[in-house]
Image (cartoon, rainbow, N blue to C red):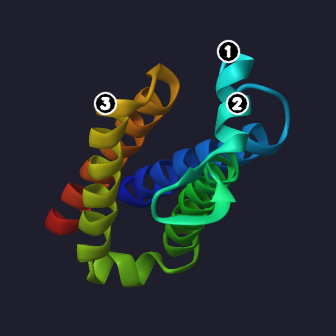
């Protein structure tokens, strides 16, 4: 039972962080640069890969899709823990995959992000690791 609780907790962290990130993407200036001229420049330029969108629109789109990915992963993990615990007990490989995914996100967070997502991902990764170990030995 503890393994499933920890597995669900790890998913809840992802779902929560993803939801908060999506809200910050579309509401308020939290993901805007302090220097307004940077935003203006991003709105006025395109990327080398395409001229179909501005760098600013790509920034918003990347943030939104990133949020949706975290939300989807969190929802999948939560549903697996809550509705398919017996399956998960018989196939702990899914807990190990969740751990590997969280660990990779944590590596990115350590290199590129800031304290709040990094700490949340560290907690989630730990939950998935302990859940995977418990499911594998139990």
Mark 2 secondary-structure assignment: helix
Q: With respect to residue 134, does 9 lie above or below?
A: above
Residue 110 numbered mark, or none: 3
| Farthest-out residue, top | 34
Is mark 2 in CB contact (under 8 Å) with mark 1?
A: yes
Q: Position of residue 78 (x, y in %)?
A: 56, 64
Is residue 31 among what the camera can see?
no
Where's residue 88, x and y in %? 36, 77
Q: CA distance from mark 3 to mark 1?
A: 25 Å
Residue plotted at (42% across, 50% down): 6
Crowdedness near tag 2: few (<14), some (14–19) or many (≥20) residues, C-alpha within 10 Å:
some
- Name which residue lies at 41% across and 81% down: 86
Marks 3 and 1: which is nearer the front?
1
Residue linked to disc 2:
39
Q: Quadrant of the C terminus?
A: bottom left
The residue identified by callout 1 is 35
Q: Is residue 128 or residue 50 the one in the foreground?
A: 50
Give the residue drawn at x 66%, y 33%: 41
What is the spatial separation of the Cα atoms under label 2 and label 1, in whole angstroms? Answer: 7 Å
Identify the image quadrant of residue 39: top right
Taking depth in this image into account, of 32 and 69 the one nearest to the observer is 32
Picture quarter with the N terminus? bottom left
């Amino acid at each position: 039972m503890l393994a499933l609780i920890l597995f669900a907790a790890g998913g809840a962290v992802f779902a929560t962080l993803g939801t908060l990130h999506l809200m910050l993407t579309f509401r308020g200036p939290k993901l805007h640069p302090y220097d307004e001229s940077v935003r203006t420049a991003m709105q006025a330029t395109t990327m080398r890969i395409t001229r179909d969108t501005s760098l600013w629109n790509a920034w918003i789109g990347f943030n939104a899709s990133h949020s949706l990915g975290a939300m989807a992963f969190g929802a999948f993990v939560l549903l697996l823990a809550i509705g398919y615990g017996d399956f998960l007990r018989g196939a702990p490989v899914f807990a190990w995959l969740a751990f590997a995914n969280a660990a990779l996100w944590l590596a990115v967070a350590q290199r590129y992000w800031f304290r709040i997502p990094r700490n949340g991902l560290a907690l989630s990764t730990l939950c998935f690791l302990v859940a995977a170990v418990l499911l594998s030995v139990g």
